[in-house]
Amino acid sequence: MSAMPLTWREKLSYGGGSVASNLSWNMVAGFLIVYYTDVALLPAAAVGTLVLVTRIIDAAFDPVVGVIVDRTRSRFGKVRPYLLFAPIPFAILCVLTFLVPDASQATKLIYACVTFGLLGLAYSFLYVPYGALQPTLTNDQRAQLQLSGIRAMGTSVASIIVYALVLPTVAWFAARTGGNGYGGAATVFAIATAILYWNVFVSCPERITVVQTAAASNSIGKSLRELMHNKIWIIAILFEVLIFIRLGLMVPAMAFYSREVLHQPSLTSILLPLMSVSILTGGILAPWYLGRLRKRRGVIVALCFSSVFFALMPFLSGSLPLLLAAFFLSMVSQGVQATTIFTMITEAVELQQRKFGTRSEGLISSSTSFTQKVGFAIGSSLVAYTLAFAGYDPKVQHEAVGVAITWLISAGPILVAVLQIACIAFYDVDDSAVGKMIVETPAAAQEVRA
């Protein structure tokens, strides 16, 4: 089959889908716990349980969505119908999630559980099909690498935009409507999300149709049993859960850290974008870095490096420049770890084909989405449980809350790093035939998203 090049409009439109995937969802990830505890006045412990349970149920739904997408046939193709219809319920649910009614605690908790749970399910019908679209666009490997790179950049751009603009947007709406402003901000980001997804639908036609073979049509149960014999996949998903536990811990904690420890709530709009820039920097440096130290050694060194700066953070709150510098350096390794995961997932696909004759890209892609959501759920719930343990009250300044948050964002990542080092120590295929992947182009691993 001859290569199918893409136009720059198609490439940039597909990258816009990555921005769409992270606009509203990053607002949820970064600010929903703040909204639930400070505006909706839900108990912190209940919020922790709500986030943990709903996100895990949502994560378990991803493989089901993958199977549904794989079996879809329509005049728009297999994937694109979801990008046309799913943005509408997702946008509505995103706004409703930030409109908890003024009612009894039980009513508010039920409302929050239903809206947040449905939001996660709606997001699955966007993110999984969006990932599945990429392999259908072209069989040109250079174009695929460009798509992956643009997609990765879109993720970082969206994170920086959201983390920098959410609180100012909330304040703008609050000043003009007299409300809390979160519903207005959610509406802005939800509309932008829908428009960008619709642009992907219009601009990115499916060109490649993969014929299912008998081997590729295994039941989910059989495919999962085969994956349990894929050592690289097991290490990768455990490592990825830990990555997202750290992210799930750090992202929502920044709002409380800015207010309770630094006593400058506006710093949230600096700390979170700085985190995204730091991770992006690590991703840019990763190909050169991992090309010299290889994945296992490189990750271990990077984790030790970041742990030093996490350990320093409790002692630097009195000097904002030093604190910001330590915070930036502590998160650079996150980009290195993400690059490593992308490469390991590609290796897992290759190993799956070698051992069982099927690549299982779709199931492996769904499993990584599952681990991301589970990890973020655990990390976010830990923030809520820490607030509850310290006796958090949004109306009262409490020194114990500041101390608890400080040590959570310092000791928590260090403990996660120790577990990551123990996990990656079992990865021993850097020099094997499967392990010799093209680390210089880690974004290519995004191709495994079916």
Image (cartoon, rainbow, N blue to C red):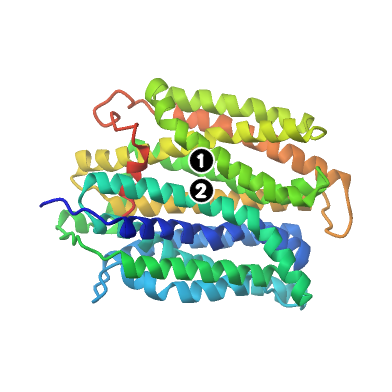
Is 217 in front, or is 320?
Answer: 320
Which secondary structure lies at badge 2?
helix
Give percent across and percent down for residue 445.
Answer: 34, 43
Q: Residues within 10 Å of mark 1 (few under 14, many from 20)?
A: many
Above or below — where is 284 with respect to 272?
Answer: above
Report the residue marked by disc 2.
156
Mark positioned earlier in the residue sequence (2 or 1): 2
Percent x, y of residue 330: 62, 32
The image quadrant where one finds the C terminus is: bottom left
**Mark 2 to mark 1: distance in Å?**
6 Å
Of the residues shown, which amino acid type is indicated by label 1? Answer: Leu
Q: Is residue 215 left or right of residue 450?
A: left
The residue located at (25%, 44%) in the rendering is 142
- Decide if residue 280 is in sight here: yes
**Residue for point 76% across, 47% down:** 258
User: Viewed as shown, does residue 373 lie left or right of 262?
Assistant: left
Residue type for callout 2: Ser
Q: Which mark is residue 280?
A: 1
Secondary structure under tag 1 reads helix
Residue sitting at x 52%, y 36%: 281
> x, y percentage for residue 340?
42, 35
State yes or no: discs 2 and 1 in contact (Cβ < 8 Å).
yes
